[in-house]
Image (cartoon, helix red, strand yellow):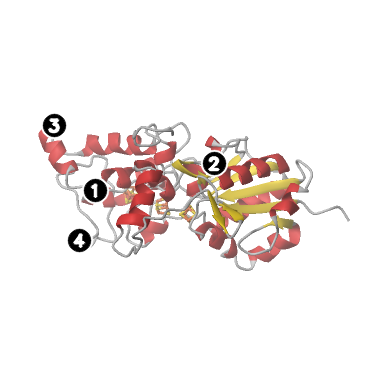
Amino acid sequence: MPDKPKVAFYWCASCGGCEEAVVDLGADILKVVDAVDIVLWPVALDFKKKDVEAMADGSIAVAFINGAIRNSEQEEWVHMLRKKAGLVVAFGACAHLGGIPGLANFTNKAEIFDTVYGTLPIMDNAAKAVPMQSTSVGGNTLTLPDFWDSVKPLNRVIDVDYYLPGCAPPPDLIMGAVLAILKGELPPRGSVLSPNKACCDDCPRKDSKPDKIEITAVKRITTSIPDPEKCFLAEGYVCLGPATRSGCGSRCIEGNMPCRGCFGPMDGIYDQGAKFISAFASILSPKDDASIGAIMDTIPDPAGTFYRFSLPTSLLFRKKMGGPA
Ligand code: SF4
Ligand code: SF4
Ligand code: SF4
């Protein structure tokens, strides 16, 4: 009997939700486990780094890597997995776009450490001790990975073959990708494994979206309850559906929440946030700068709203703060 294809799952700067998404395959996970030989899956199975190091280059059929890259250990692991794996799939919004951890690119290591280990009200740290890369304790040296100023999507560190979008990717897309890999029926290298059309095209509310939208004021879901039948954008809520790739099954919309853009942009759009801002500005009813500015000022966190998942893959990449990137 031929060897089963070897598959690795690995996580970097992530919340664990993408690992949960694999477990959420439910009974289908058994089909995957039956069809492949899982050689690395830190959240579920106790494989060691030396086990992976000992494998021949290219011997893993596919490595699914979730999470963004924000420290030296993650970079070391993904370089190793790139060498060991024939295919690398960026799994989930953090690996694909930088994701929620990528919002840290609005600050830097010094500010993060100062806040987390210094000024947080719950912090009792009079000595202002912060994690050191190397610490001597009882004659031994303990080391930690180097924490970087910038969060990067996976493809800024290694070559990526495919992208599974979403925070987290839904089970049907995961199974579709796994089956396509097993059957060797993959689209061109570099593809995002989700339909290349806008969320609006699949939205259950699309018939309520008029051809011409005019927004006079921005509404917020924290202060008003959206009509569950009507297009969010037409009602004045920020909904990134027009600038976001479809394939999620309208998960947020079904929960009466506007789209926040976790599937990233369609092909050919480099900056999802800028694309949406441009579209949004064009549907604001007032056309003079002062009135447009007044409306935009009512959005409390514009950068976190328009770039919630995509700051590290945007033209901005990070806030300029001096020091290394
Ligand atoms: S994509 Fe979402 S679910 Fe996956 S690791 Fe990032 S934040 Fe968590
Ligand atoms: S803007 Fe939002 S609510 Fe309206 S059709 Fe598009 S995805 Fe649906
Ligand atoms: S509706 Fe938007 S934010 Fe929500 S899961 Fe779908 S793509 Fe992601």
Label 2 vs 3, first from the N-terminus: 2
Residue occupying the far bottom of the picture: 27
Asked if disc 1 is less than 8 Å from ligand 2, the answer is yes
Instruction: Give how far apart the Cα atoms at labels 2 and 4 are.
Output: 38 Å
Q: Mark 3 points at which residue?
A: 289
Classify mark 1: residues with Cα within 10 Å, few (<14), some (14-19) or many (20+): some
Label 1 vs 3, first from the N-terminus: 1
Location of residue 316 with respect to 46 vertically, above or below: above
Give me the disc on residue 224.
Answer: 4
Name which residue type carries label 1: Ala
Which image quadrant: the N terminus? bottom right
Residue 201, percent from left and from top: 40, 45
Location of residue 226 with respect to 208 vertically, above or below: below
Q: Mark 2 points at which residue?
A: 154
Name which residue type carries label 3: Asp
Label 2 vs 4, first from the N-terminus: 2
Q: Name the residue under label 1.
A: 234
**Quick check: marks 2 and 4 in contact, CB under 8 Å?**
no
Label 1 vs 4, first from the N-terminus: 4
Instruction: Give how far apart the Cα atoms at labels 1 and 2 are.
Output: 35 Å
Is any atom of residue 260 visible in this view?
no
Name which residue type carries label 2: Leu
